[in-house]
Amino acid sequence: MITVSLDWIAAAVDGDLADPDTCGRQVTGAVCTDSRRIAAGDLFVALAGERVDGHDFLAAAAQAGASAALVMRRVTDAPLPLVVVDDTTAALGRLARAVLDRARAEGALEHVIGITGSAGKTTTKRILGHLLEQVGETVYPQGSFNNEIGAPLTMLRTTLDTRFVVVEMGASHIGDLRYLSGIARPDLGVELQVGLAHVGEFGSVDNIRVAKQELVEALPADGVAVLNADDVNVRRMAEHTAASVTWFGEHPDADVRILRVDVDGEGLRVRLAVDGEELAARVALLGEHNAWNIAAATAAARRTGLSLETIRRGLESLPGGERWRMQVLHRSDGVTIVNDGYNASPGSMAAALRTLAGIKRAGHRTIAVLGAMGELGEASGPEHDRIGQDVVRLDIDQLVVVAPEARRIFLAAEQEGSWGGEAVYCETADEAHAWLAPRLREGDVVLVKSSNAAGLRFLGDRLYEDAAQ
């Protein structure tokens, strides 16, 4: 974060200094909500959760070197200077906005870019962040920091040398993106897709569209909305923004158009038409669906001024998948684990299965280990059925379904025509591991896919680690 004084922080967050004599104290480090991760000079933000209250860890933060703390109540004999506010979560957002405003006014900050969508946010922000850091200091989230706490923490990593800030924006309710956009005030917004993720909370796909379009509604008239030309709900968002629009996708009218995608077990080769020129790159991301994330990041990067050659070099130097997100793990015995257990929606589950089918090699088996997709509401049953049908239609060699919440995948696969042990149901991840471990052989490709709550990402890790034992 930019080095600031406590009186500056107090003014920015509408707070009060518990001890006015500490007004000149400088915060020289980062902003942190976890006392276990505090470093010297950091500002500790005491959040009060359902099970843990950050105010109980002021002493630990002070001992770790925190310069001050943001709190919701005055603490007698506090071990470090305090800035007192009504709500530390809201104050975190106000502080992030003030830091970005100062970076715009006094620093090198050129663009703040918001990214949202029912799927693909984390991958797209990683691609775009990597592209932008080829030409200047870039801040973008580590992991899925995309809510009212994580997104401001990302923004607060901004310094006076930062040129680009990429903010991943998630939404569980209408109004969430309006709130985050009010903090970040992005000049460029990327809308990836409107799908069924969180439909159980939103109630309908149309409500999801309304929630997602809050990002482009917040863009200024001189801003840019980067929209998916292939998604009918995203196309409708063009009517709800004052910004200029850049389209990406396979659609003939797309400004960044996907011409061809070739996929293998190590990644994909993508050809794009960009501003009348062709861009071809080999990218270490698994799955044809990532071509849309690449196209979205390319479109955003172009609107920030990056050359096609800089983008091509950035795409080809992009590291492989993040942990638990289509993460390719090669075991020493020739078995490949594709661990994609961090998140799952009907769209991403179907895309992962298509990827698994697409990398199948003669004489080698494809194995899908699937858990439940969460937050689908009334759509849960039919969507799990559809996945089971997809497994059979894609000719996946072996299906292993884990836990009661996902059992409909197994039943649908059997009804679609899977028999003779091609589909197996296991009550727990331990049971699935016990069934799988002795049966895996050289050349097998195993996809592990579920929502985060199902916990199959740990099964993916365990299957990979088996070869080392």
Image: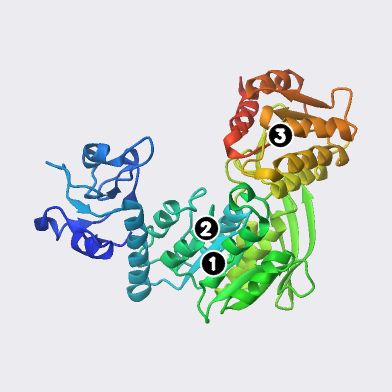
x%, y% of residue 143?
Answer: 51, 48
For marks 3 and 1, give the one nearer the viewer. Answer: 1
At label 1, counting other C-alpha atoms closer than 10 Å, the crowd grade (few under 14, some 14-19, many 20 or more) is many
Residue corresponding to mark 2: 169
Is any atom of residue 217 visible in this view?
A: yes
Q: Which amino acid is tagged 1?
A: Leu
Q: Residue at x 74, y 43 (%)?
A: 383
Q: Which amino acid is tagged 2?
A: Met
Instruction: Note whether 439 is above or below 208 in the view shown.
Output: above
Q: Residue at x 64, y 50 (%)?
A: 199
The residues bearing labels 3 and 2 have C-alpha atoms spaced at a distance of: 27 Å
The residues bearing labels 1 and 2 have C-alpha atoms spaced at a distance of: 9 Å
Instruction: Note whether 24 is above or below 64 in the view shown.
Output: below
The residues bearing labels 3 and 1 have C-alpha atoms spaced at a distance of: 33 Å
Q: Residue at x 11, y 58 (%)?
A: 20
Residue corresponding to mark 3: 370
Are dots 1 and 2 in contact, CB under 8 Å?
A: yes
Direction from residue 376 to residue 3 in the image, left or right:
left
Q: Which amino acid is tagged 3?
A: Leu
Taking depth in this image into account, of 317 and 173 the one nearest to the observer is 173
Q: Residue at x 65, y 23 (%)?
A: 428
Give the SS element for disc 1.
helix
Q: Earlier in the sequence, mark 1 or mark 2?
A: 2
Residue corresponding to mark 1: 215
